[in-house]
Structure formats: structure tokens, C-alpha cells
Amino acid sequence: MKPTIRLVVTDLDNTLYDWVSFFVPSFYAMVDEAVELLQVDRERLLDDLQEVHVRYGTSEQPFALLETKVVEDRLSGKSTQERVAFLDPAFHAFNRVRKETLKAYPGVIEGLRTLAGLRCEIVAHTEAPVVNALFRLNSLSISPFLKALYATATHGPGHPDPARAKVRLPNHGIHVLNSEQLKPAPDILRTIIDERGVLPSETLYIGDSLTRDIAMARGAGARSAWAKYGRSFTAEDWQRLVRVTHWTEADVARESELRQQFAGITADVDLSNFADISNQFNFEPSDSDVRLGSSAIGTEAAANRS
Ligand SMILES: [Mg+2]
């Protein structure tokens, strides 16, 4: 007998798409362009960017380039809008490479469609900021399958274009999590499960990290599926990410502690392809029927159906 699942909670980065393999090339395309524009030493710019990442506690702080010391030095006396205009080719380089490299993994859309067809509730959970997560879910056309997004608050000055600085988030379906509480704290998942009104044993968590996603699922008494395909990025991209990461020494120490604590942990199922999930469990409908919306930012339809 396959276990019955009424709630699927899926991780985003490296579970639905390869975050490392899109973010790192996009980021470095921006860096290469900025090095030319600013006529700055590349390593100095990388140091400056890393400093901004550490300050905000995230390696994907939007427009971090504008907050680097070197931009402050070279473009002092210029307004934010003038700085943005000057650095525009660098921001465009990021967007261009992201467009080429941000792709859903094979089987993701197909698998989500199958689960949604069975009317099983699907929600997304990430430690990434809401704005970044929503952008990806919308541009990959994943949002229509989701009933909710659980993500962390976005900090910093926001989009430099005043017209876009105040991103109107849909008041429905977005849940901002306390960013102090990190995976694998089981309380994060317990909160989500309680809010959705199902039992832990009827919940399936899908994620690419054994020590964070799978450990959290087990701690909360939920079922788990390990997206083992999510580790297929290159060592070179990983090293380039580490070069600018926000991780502090404490973060690195915590990581190695987790690896020891959860050595040998396994999930209920291992996935070589996201779509394989549909054969592994018995997915059942949940009660409510409100979705995040195809263009979740300011979606009237989603709001009106609440
Ligand atoms: Mg992940």
C-alpha cells in the first residue's frame, strides 16, 4: 500500500531548477561587464560584492553591485539613477545569461501537472527571499501549480527604479518566514503543515539537501523525497559561488556539524527525475482550491478567489 499524501511541500533551489548553474554564470557575466565599466580589479570587486552578501546574509542580494565600495568610490557624486544607468550593461548581462540558463529540471512541470491533476495541494518552501523566489516561479511558469509560497523577507533598498521598488506582492498565498529559523528546524515544516490543515504523515517534502530538507522532513514526522539530481552542478561553479558567498565561519562550522549529525540519513524515496514522484505515493485531493496565480505579483484573480 502506497502512503497517502494530501500536501506536497517542495523546496525550490536545486529541486525545481538548478540555482547554482544559472545564478553563478549570470552573476559572473555581470561581474565581467562591471570590471570593464568601472576599470576595477576583478578580485577587488568580488571582495566588495562578498561584503554586501555577508551584510545581508544572502548571496543573491538584488542590485548588490550598487552597494559595493568600489561603486561608491568611482561613482561618488552620481545619483542612484545615474549609477544604475552607468552600470546598465552589467545588469543586462546578468538578465541575459539568466534567461539562457534558468530552466526547470526535466520532469518538473510534468510532475507538478500530474499532482495538480490529482488535486493534491502543492506549496513551495525556500530560504531565498520572496522577490527572488517569485521571479523564478513566475518565469518558469511554476506558480499556477502552487497554492502558496513560504519564503524569507527581502531586505535592502529594493529595485532602484522607483516605479518598481514597491513590488506589490499578492496578499494571498505568500507567507514570509522568520529568516532566523533555518532548515533543518522541524518547526518550520510543522508550521506549514498546521497552516495547511493536514497531518505530518500525509505530507511529503521534496528537496535536494539530505542534511537540511530531508532531516527537516524526518524531524517533523513527514514523508520525504530526495531530489538527488539536484547536486549535478559543476565543481567550478560551486567554487565560483563560494568565492562570493555570504557564509560566515559560523555557517561553515554549522554545515559540518549538520553533516556529522545527519550522516547516513536517507529519504523515503530517491528521485532521479521529479516526475517519478507520481508513482511513489497515493496523492489525494485537499479541500481548498485557491492557487498562487500564473503571474503572482498583483494577481487579481488569486486575490479575488480567497
Ligand atoms: Mg535546495
Image (cartoon, helix red, strand yellow):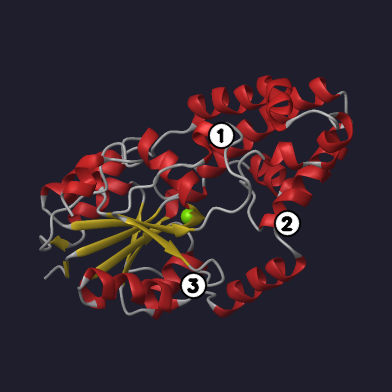
User: How far across and down, in percent of the image, does residue 238 sit?
Assistant: 65, 46
Image: 275 above or below 37: below
- For label 2, the SS is helix
- For label 1, the SS is helix
Q: Nearer the viewer, residue 38 or 204?
A: 38
Amino acid type, residue under disc 2 in the picture: Arg
Residue under the point 36% across and 79% down: 220
Quadrant that contains the C terminus: bottom left
Q: Nearer the viewer, residue 118 or 303?
A: 303
From mark 2 to mark 1, how far is it between C-alphas? 23 Å
Question: Does residue 60 appear to the left or right of 78 in the view shown?
Answer: left
Q: Nearer the viewer, residue 82 or 189?
A: 82
Q: Which residue is mark 1?
A: 162
CB of mark 3 near ligand 1 (< 8 Å): no
Residue under the point 47% across and 33% down: 102
Amino acid type, residue under disc 3 in the picture: Pro
User: How far across and down, in percent of the image, does residue 151 sit?
Assistant: 44, 58
From mark 3 to mark 2, how far is it between C-alphas? 23 Å
Mark before the other along the chain sequence, 1 or 3 = 1
Q: Quadrant of residue 43?
A: top right
Image: 181 above or below 97: below
